[in-house]
């Protein structure tokens, strides 16, 4: 199937073409026609499947006729983290290139004034994290009663991060008659229940099994003594040909420790976690993306949804507590037909979490 068959206008088709998208991904093929017909969607898709495009393309198409009013956005996209919200806004800007829709990005850590100026001029699309949006609503800077199109991205992560009460508050302020798209990497019972309150007769679309790991990823578990973890990590980095790697740590404090240790050992590293202010986070990501840093040390939450292509390696400084995070972490490598390598450092206390991973991926992990 081609993009031309999906019912998108020529401006959207031109920008997609310039972005190098030659054909729609599975989620795009399945979701775009239903979204254009006005249906609610319950989408199960993880990052990397092209899910952002699957809602941005039809959203732009739908909003293309119509006018925005001051402080009353016509559509709202909620994302759990600033990074994900920024990524969604970048995709929006690229696809909107030949159209004139206005967008505002409301995320924590950046100045209110600039966001406020945009809102006062009127926006078609508002992309926000839930907390920041509620701040603006409480200050009377934005009214969401005119939103006809709502997207909730990464609902499972919203749940993990404790944002569901905020979503419920926001939902009460939204009009009942609207189109809603609800995306999650997993569709647990709890997630479905949250979806029930937000969606009307949704079409359920599932792509890619979250528990499956690409055959292109070589995943190895390395036994370590807790005290030697840093040195083991250094050894791994020295023996591997690392072009570009992410090191995941469970604790924010470990991110700084690993960062300092590796910098002392002449590795070019940057880090990304929730305690860094927004400007530092943006700088870290820029350095990593333009390859002036070869290693990004991150927490699950901060790295969630960040689109980083061409990773040669993923290192887990510890076994994640949530088995789905393991699949998500190592899935950052071995993308688009490339080979990738993932190392997970574990010690004797990690047996339970390894068992949970094995249960999820339905096979034993390879330990040395
Ligand atoms: P997402 O799942 O939205 O995070 O998208 C993952 C990556 O796929 C991003 O780098 C997108 O730019 C890219 N992408 C989205 N749609 C397509 C497409 N149809 N063809 C090729 N790449 C795409």
Image (cartoon, rainbow, N blue to C red):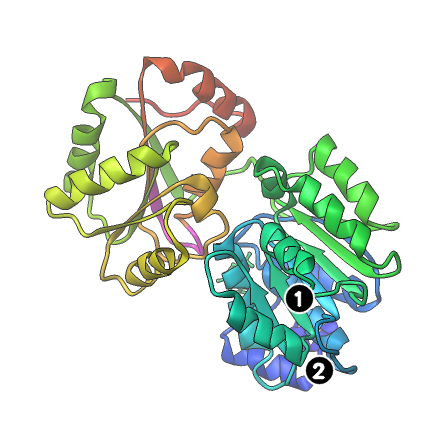
Residue position marked by numbered label 2 in the rendering: 9
Left or right: 274, with 75 as reference point: left
Residue 268 lies in magenta, yes or no?
Answer: no
**Residue at x 23%, y 26% (from the top left corner):** 229
The answer to whether residue 226 of the structure is visible from this angle is yes
Q: Is residue 307 above or below residue 224?
A: below
SS type, badge 2: loop
| 256 or 326: nearer the viewer | 256
| 121 or 23: nearer the viewer | 121
Dominant secondary structure of the residues highlighted in magenta in the image: loop
On-image quarter of the N terminus: bottom right
Q: Residue 284 occupies which quadrant of the picture? A: bottom left
Q: Residue 104 occupies which quadrant of the picture? A: bottom right
Q: Horizontal and vertical percent for residue 182?
A: 72, 51
Q: Horizontal and vertical percent for residue 123?
A: 67, 75
Asked if the residues shown at circle 2 and circle 1 are in contact, with their CB atoms under 8 angstroms apart, the answer is no
Q: Horizontal and vertical percent for residue 53?
A: 61, 65
Magenta segment boundaries in residue numbering: 335-341
Residue position marked by numbered label 1 in the rendering: 141
**Residue at x 53%, y 65% (from the top left corner):** 112
Residue 339 lies in magenta, yes or no?
Answer: yes
Left or right: 248, with 25 as reference point: left
* Cα distance between the residues tagged 2 and 1: 33 Å
The answer to whether residue 209 of the structure is visible from this angle is no
SS type, badge 1: loop
On-image quarter of the C terminus: top left
Q: Is residue 207 above or below residue 193?
A: below
* Mark 2 surroundings within 10 Å by alpha-carbon count, few (fewer than 14), some (14 through 19), many (20 or more): some
Left or right: 180, with 270 as reference point: right
Q: Does the beta carbon at disc 1 come under 8 Å from ligand 1?
A: no
**Residue at x 54%, y 51% (from the top left corner):** 47
């Amino acid at each position: 199937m081609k993009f031309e068959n999906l019912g998108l206008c020529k401006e959207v088709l031109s920008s997609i073409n310039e972005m190098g998208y030659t054909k729609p991904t599975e989620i795009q093929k399945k979701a775009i026609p239903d979204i254009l017909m006005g249906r609610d969607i319950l989408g199960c898709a993880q990052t990397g499947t092209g899910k952002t495009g699957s809602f941005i393309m039809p959203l732009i198409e739908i909003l293309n006729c119509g006018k925005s009013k001051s402080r009353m956005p016509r559509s709202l996209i909620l994302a759990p983290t600033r990074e994900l919200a920024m990524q969604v806004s970048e995709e929006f800007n690229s696809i909107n290139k030949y159209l004139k829709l206005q967008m505002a990005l409301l995320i924590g850590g950046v100045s209110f004034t600039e966001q406020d100026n945009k809102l006062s001029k009127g926006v078609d699309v508002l992309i926000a994290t839930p907390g920041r949006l509620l701040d603006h609503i409480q200050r009377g800077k934005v009214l969401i009663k005119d939103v006809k199109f709502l997207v909730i991205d990464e609902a499972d992560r919203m749940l993990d991060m404790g944002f569901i009460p905020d979503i419920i508050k926001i939902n009460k302020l939204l009009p009942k008659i609207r189109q809603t798209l609800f995306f999650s990497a997993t569709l647990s019972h709890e997630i479905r229940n949250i979806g029930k309150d937000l969606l009307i007769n949704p079409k359920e679309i599932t792509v890619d099994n979250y528990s499956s790991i690409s055959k292109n990823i070589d995943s190895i578990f390395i036994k370590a003594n807790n005290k030697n973890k840093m040195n083991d990590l250094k050894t791994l980095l020295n023996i591997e040909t690392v072009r570009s790697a992410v090191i995941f740590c469970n604790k924010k404090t470990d991110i700084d420790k690993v960062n300092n240790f590796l910098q002392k050992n002449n590795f070019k590293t940057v880090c990304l976690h929730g305690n860094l202010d927004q400007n530092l986070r943006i700088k870290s990501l820029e350095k990593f993306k333009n390859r002036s840093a070869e290693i990004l040390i991150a927490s699950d939450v901060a790295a969630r949804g960040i689109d980083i292509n061409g990773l040669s390696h993923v290192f887990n400084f510890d076994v994640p507590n949530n088995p789905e995070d393991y699949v998500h972490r190592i899935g950052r490598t071995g993308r688009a037909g490339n080979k990738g390598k993932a190392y997970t450092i574990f010690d004797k206390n990690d047996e339970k979490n390894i068992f949970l991973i094995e249960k999820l991926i339905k096979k034993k992990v390879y330990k040395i």
